[in-house]
Image (cartoon, grey):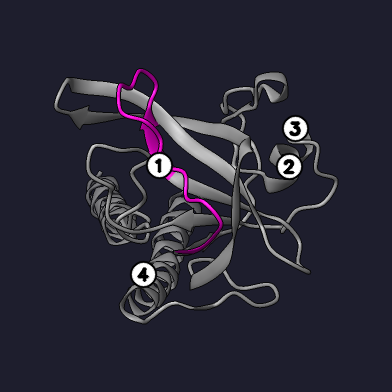
């Protein structure tokens, strides 16, 4: 039993070391993308690619995504993210997460007129988890960033298979507030590895104490 438990603990620790190197690679990729200038959006880009896209935003084809509480001048304020359609000539329409807007707001939403260029990063489609809140397509309220489902609620049979998360400075006294930087996924794998290896060491010490007492008996 001790050997089996030791193998499991060492395996879990080694797996976390593997995950640590994998996560460090992702974080390095994100850092390089954030430091680099945006590239024109072409084809099917990889997640976290920073791109620039030109098109026409449709204020009449919009939805809300997620729930987020932020500190504002009025104190902690609940809001969500504004999803709007960007029409691109000769290309599939693209859903853009323009940024956070408070649910109760006094300032208007900034709506560019005509062609506009949006800089942001690519977000791959998400799937709902076991504890995800249920989407409400009838009110265009979503908690999973799935472009196919959001596009269907807007009456669009086909949209780009990813979402563009807009980046840039927040407009003064206007909404939405776009993302300021690319996301940084948490990297706690080293702590997890130390925990598993520590438990393996504790198991060896406990077995050694037990074996010593048993042999003396």
Q: Which residue is label 1 attached to?
A: 110
Quadrant of the rendered image containing residue 142 = top right
Dominant secondary structure, magenta:
loop
Within-10-Å neighbours for mark 3: few <14, some 14–19, many 20+: many
Secondary structure state at the residue bearing disc 1: loop
Alpha carbon separation for disc pair 4 and 3: 34 Å
State the quadrant of the C terminus.
top left
Q: Return the disc, 1 or 2, that comes first in the chain's sequence.
A: 1
Alpha carbon separation for disc pair 2 and 4: 30 Å
Alpha carbon separation for disc pair 4 and 1: 32 Å
- Range of the magenta residues? 99-118
Q: Which residue is label 2 attached to?
A: 151
Q: Return the disc, 4 or 1, that comes first in the chain's sequence.
A: 4
Secondary structure state at the residue bearing disc 3: helix
Q: Residue at x 80, y 36 (%)?
A: 155
> Could you tell me residue 114's position as x and y percent?
56, 56
> Could you tell me residue 216's position as x and y percent?
22, 49
Secondary structure state at the residue bearing disc 2: helix
Q: Nearer the viewer, mark 1 or mark 2?
A: 1
């Amino acid at each position: 039993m001790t050997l089996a438990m030791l193998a499991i603990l060492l395996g879990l620790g080694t797996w976390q070391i593997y995950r640590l190197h994998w996560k460090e690679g992702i974080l390095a990729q994100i850092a390089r993308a954030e430091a680099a200038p945006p590239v024109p959006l072409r084809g099917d880009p990889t997640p976290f690619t920073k791109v620039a896209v030109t098109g026409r935003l449709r204020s009449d084809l919009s939805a809300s995504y997620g729930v987020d509480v932020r500190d504002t001048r009025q104190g902690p304020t609940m809001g969500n993210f504004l999803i709007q359609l960007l029409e691109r000539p000769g290309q599939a329409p693209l859903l853009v997460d323009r940024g956070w807007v408070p649910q109760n707001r006094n300032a208007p939403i900034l709506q560019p007129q005509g062609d506009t260029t949006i800089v942001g990063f690519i977000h791959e489609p998400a799937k709902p988890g076991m504890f995800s809140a249920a989407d409400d397509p009838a009110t265009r309220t979503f908690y999973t960033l799935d472009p196919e489902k959001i596009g269907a609620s807007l009456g669009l049979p086909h949209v780009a298979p990813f979402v563009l998360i807009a980046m840039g400075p927040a407009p003064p006294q206007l909404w939405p507030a776009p993302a300021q930087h690319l996301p940084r996924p948490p990297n706690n794998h080293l702590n997890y590895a130390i925990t598993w290896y520590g438990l393996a060491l504790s198991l060896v010490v406990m077995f050694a104490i037990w074996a010593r007492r048993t042999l003396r008996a």
